[in-house]
Every structure is written in structure tokens, then in C-alpha cells.
Image: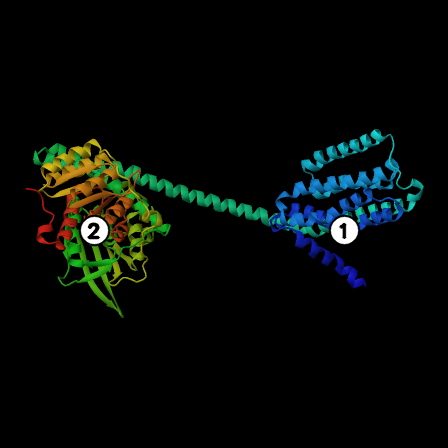
Amino acid sequence: MGTNLTSLPIHLDKIVNWFLPKTIEVNTDRAKNVRMFLLSHLLGPLLGHPITLFLLLNDPQPWPHVWILGASLTMFWVFPFAVKFFGRYYETLAFISIQNLTFAILWGAYNYGGVSSPFLIWLVTVPLLAFFYLGSSWIARIAVPISMVVSTGLFYLAYISDKSFPVNIPLSSMVEAGLVSAISACGYVFMMAIYYTNIVDSQSELLKEKDRHDQTMQELIGAKEDAEAANGAKSDFLAKMSHELRTPLNAVIGYSEILLEDAELESRGEDIADLQKISAAGKHLLAMVNDVLDISKIEAGKMELFIEEIDLVGFLHDVEFTARPMIIQNSNKLFVHRNEDLGVIEADATKLRQTILNLLSNAAKFTQNGRIDLKIERENRGNEEFVNISISDTGVGISDEHKGLLFNNFKQAHPSISAKFGGTGLGLSVSLKLCQLMGGNISVESKVDKGSCFTISLPAKAASGLGEIGISEELQGAQVTSQESEPATARKEHSQQQETKDQTTIVVIDDDKAVLELVERQLSKEGYNVVTTDSAQTGLQLTRKLIPDLVLLDIQMPETDGWEVLHALQSDKVTAKCPVAILSVVDERRKALELGAIDLIDKPFNIEKLNRVIQRLNRNRGDDQLVRKSA
């Protein structure tokens, strides 16, 4: 028997928990109130119906008042089901239940004894239950007291209208009913108080522990959100800085080179020196911006590789051609050591070129009136073949204690180096990380006042499993709408093209008018017929009408980005075979090739880059399809 009584609260809790909605269970304070509500409604009618039974047995005419009272008490069993299925309206259900209890008490009191009724004692439980059900909410504090005053007023008005209370059972015959009512009311309050105390005691420690965990979690969430916001702000800043700095820098570099070419033709020596300084400063600043963005991409794990087969002899020839101007600035000489049978290597050509040029730039900067040697050789290491590219110089050298700082971000071997030679300390860091991404490494040997030797070591065959870039759903469904009118610049070029439609045509699409002007001037000097537009929609129209030999397409445009335009050109049967080269300040060559472009030409634009692209394009075309300069 004792065991059964001990297990009774456990079984009762299980029943209560079945009615408790999951949405309410997560809120501890609210769940406590709902548990009290469910318990009182499950057990309350059991304590109230003995009074109903007494009245049925002793009232000679129980209809309808006893039956109405019984129905009101039975209604309490409906509320647990209402809470289970309509838990979001819990406060409303609790208020309705309190009104139902008030009605049952006053209805019983009115029909059996009036103000002397033994049932009025239950009225004391109404505010107590309101507190249990609703806590300290405004409903418990304001709405419930007001409703009790209104209900009591109606009770009194009913008395005034008849000038007396009905006498269905003489008051003298309701002594037993009074005792049953008092015992039931006390038992009801006692039961609710015990249950409430058990809930508070059992949950107090749990609540404290939960509060501590909640506080810790909120602090962690706050720290995580702060970190994500800071990282997002950093990414946004770098992205905006990329566009805002690279765009004017491209214009500065492009115009300075055009002016420099004109000055050299006119032999204006003083202007040549100034323009060379402007061009060099712009290129230096652009390189710094690129290095910062590369470091950010690598650290965020967003740097992607485009692995391709590289003909090492041709590749080194291009590197040598690019590097010689900066080598001779400090009166240095460049010597290249290579065999003619170097073969091919699998690597990211753009990033490998960037790494070698970074090391050659460093060698040229720290060497004056000396020599710089570029050497490449293949080496077998067990079952794997590696390619070693060494850049040695006869410059200032690096001490052993400072070698450890070389490959750290924004660090240089010695603080005096930045003051004397300039630089940000990012070039070597970027170079090392790019080599490591390709499965290689960079080592260094150096002696002070003797020079340094940096060696790039890469596997000849790239690791497999590199991810591919697909067209996103947004890009797949992109629609580029046509416009009825064309910008004035496009119409002008279009009319000129109609006059010279027998000449080779290149369409340039870029929202930056300064870039359009630079590209047009450089291509026109080379003999190409150029059609330019700063509108993506107009560019699509021109390409469809002219079927040009080549389209130069910018990526970052405000209304319709270059990827959508490329997708539209590839999807149109008329323009699908038009070769498209991407113009971009962002190194997204892999994505460009995956989406159907023939190549990516990075800004600032120069004609040598375009010529190399055209040479590769012509290798795969018939004689009648070659891209030629106009006569």
C-alpha cells in the first residue's frame, strides 16, 4: 500500500506530462504554471462532484439548477485536452476556466443558501488559482479581480430582482453539504499547495543550473556572433576595398602606360621618368591590394586552384619576359638556367607565376648592381617527381635569427628593411601559402652580404580530388532582358562597325567607362575594330547582331553580372560559338573556364595579355576563322 502511495505522484506526473504541449515544455516558468492548471483540472471535479451528488439526492426538484452546476464542474475535464491541442491559447483558456469556476460557485450559492451558502467558501480559491495558472501576469493582477467584482455584482443584481434567494433545500438541511464543501475546498487548496511546493523544490536547483548554463551559452553565442560579425565585416571591407581600389588603380596604370608610350614616341625624357614613377607606384599599390586579398582568401579557405598542364619552357619564357623590366631597375642582370626538355608540370599556372614573380621581385629589390639567377630542374624523390625552381641573388642576405620571420604575415626580416626598401611583408607569406596549396613548399638559404637562394619545390603531378565549380541554380535560371534603345556610345560604335563589317571585331562589355576607353584605345592602336558598351543588355544585343570574333566581358557589373551574361551568350544558338574572354580584377579563372570562357584577362588590361589569348584561340581555329588585326 505504501509503495502504491509513493508511486502515485510519479503516475500523476506522467498523466500531466502527456497533456503538456512540447512548445510550452521548453519554457520552465510557463510549464510550471501549466502543470498546476492541468493537475487542478484533472482532480478538481473529483472534489466538486460530491456536492453535486448531495444536491441531487436532497433536492426534490434538481432540474435545471443542479444539472447546470454538474455540467459546469464536468467542463473542467475538457480544459486539459484544449491545452494539449491549443497550447498557444493557454492564457485565454486559463481565464475562461477561472470564469467557469466563479460561475459554478456563485450559481450554487444563489440556488442553495444565498450569502449564507456553504459553497461561497470556494470563492477564496479563485484568486489563488489565478496566481497558480497565470503567475504575475496582467490577467492575474487586473482581469481576474475585475471579473470577480463583475460576477459578484451580477449575483447581487439577481438577488435584487427577486428580493430573495431561491430555497430549493432549507439551509438547516445543508449542514452536511457545508461540511463536504469546506473539506473539499481545504483539500483542494492543500493539494495544490503541496504540488506547487514539490515543483518549486525539485526545480529550484535545476533552474539555477540551467540559468548558469543559459548564461554561459548566451555569452558563447554573443562571442560567436561578434566573431562572425567581425569576420563578415572584414570580408565586406576587403571585397569593397578590392573594387574601390582596383578600379581607379587600373585607370591610373592604364592611362599612365598610354601617356608613357606617347612620351617615348615624342622623346619627352622628363615626362617619361615621371610617368614611369606613376605607373610603378600604381602597380606596387595594386600588388599590395592583391596580396591582402589573397591572404584573406587563403585564411578563410576560399582560395581555389585551377590545375592544368604547363609547358615549362614556354612558361619560363613568359616569366622571364615579365620579370626583366623590374630586374634591370637596380642595374641587375638576370640569368636563366634551364634545359630544353623540361616537359610539362601539373599546377595552377597563374599562382605559380605569381609565386615566382614575387621571389624575383624580392631578389631585384634587395640586390643592386648584381646578378639574379633563375634555375629550374626536375628531381625524383622515391616514386614521385618534383620540379625545383630556384631564385638566387647576390644581395644583402638574411641572418639566421631573422629567417624565421620571413614567411609571417606583415613581418620582415628586420624593421629597418621596411624603411630602406619598402614593402608590406606579405609577398613571401602569400607565396609560401600558394605553394603549400599546390602540394609544395619554399625553402631558403642565405648569408648576410652574400645573397639568398629561395627554392620552390612542387610535385610534377598535382594531387587529385580538386573540387569543381558548377553553375548555381540562380545562374541557371538567369534571364537577361533586352532593351529597345542602346546607349549613345554603343550606337556610335555600332554604326562604325556597319561601315567596317569586313574587319575583325572585338566587343567589349564593361560598366567602367574609363576601362572601356583604355581598352578601346589600346585595341584600336593594334588595328582591331572595337565596339564598346557599358550595358550588359546592350552587349548581348550587339553580340547577337555583329557575331564578333571575340567578346571581352567584365564580371562585376551593377545590374547583371558577367556570369549571367556569359550564361546567356552560351545558351543562345546565335552567339554560342562566339569566344568570350573574361575581364576581371578578381582571380576567378577556374570558374571562367568552367562556365565556357576561353580565358581570363586580369586587370589592368594590356595588349600583350590579349595577344597571348588570341594566339591560343587561333591555334584551334581554321584559317578562315583566325582573329586578325585590321589592315
Depth check: 77 or 445 in front?
77
Amino acid marked by disc 1? Leu
Q: Is residue 53 left or right of residue 338?
A: right
| Quarter containing the C terminus | top left
* Disc 2: which residue: 598
Q: Residue at x 65, y 50 (%)?
A: 84
* Disc 1: which residue: 43
Q: Is residue 627 left or right of residue 405?
A: left
Question: In the displayed image of the protein, which residue is found farthest to the bottom?
Answer: 382
Numbered disc in front, either 2 or 1 = 1
Q: How many marks?
A: 2
| Residue 448 position within the rendered picture, expressed as x and y whole percent measured from the top left | 25, 52
Q: Is residue 202 visible?
A: yes
Residue 60 sits in quarter: top right
| Quarter containing the N terminus | bottom right
Amino acid marked by disc 2? Ile
| Residue 49 position within the rendered picture, expressed as x and y whole percent measured from the top left | 81, 49
Q: Is residue 423 left or right of residue 134?
A: left
Residue 518 sits in quarter: top left
Depth check: 376 or 53 in front?
53
Which of the labelled discs sits on residue 501, or is there none?
Answer: none
Callout 2–callout 1 Cβ contact below 8 Å = no
How crowded pointer 2 is (Cα within 10 Å; few <14, some 14-19, many 20+) is rated as many
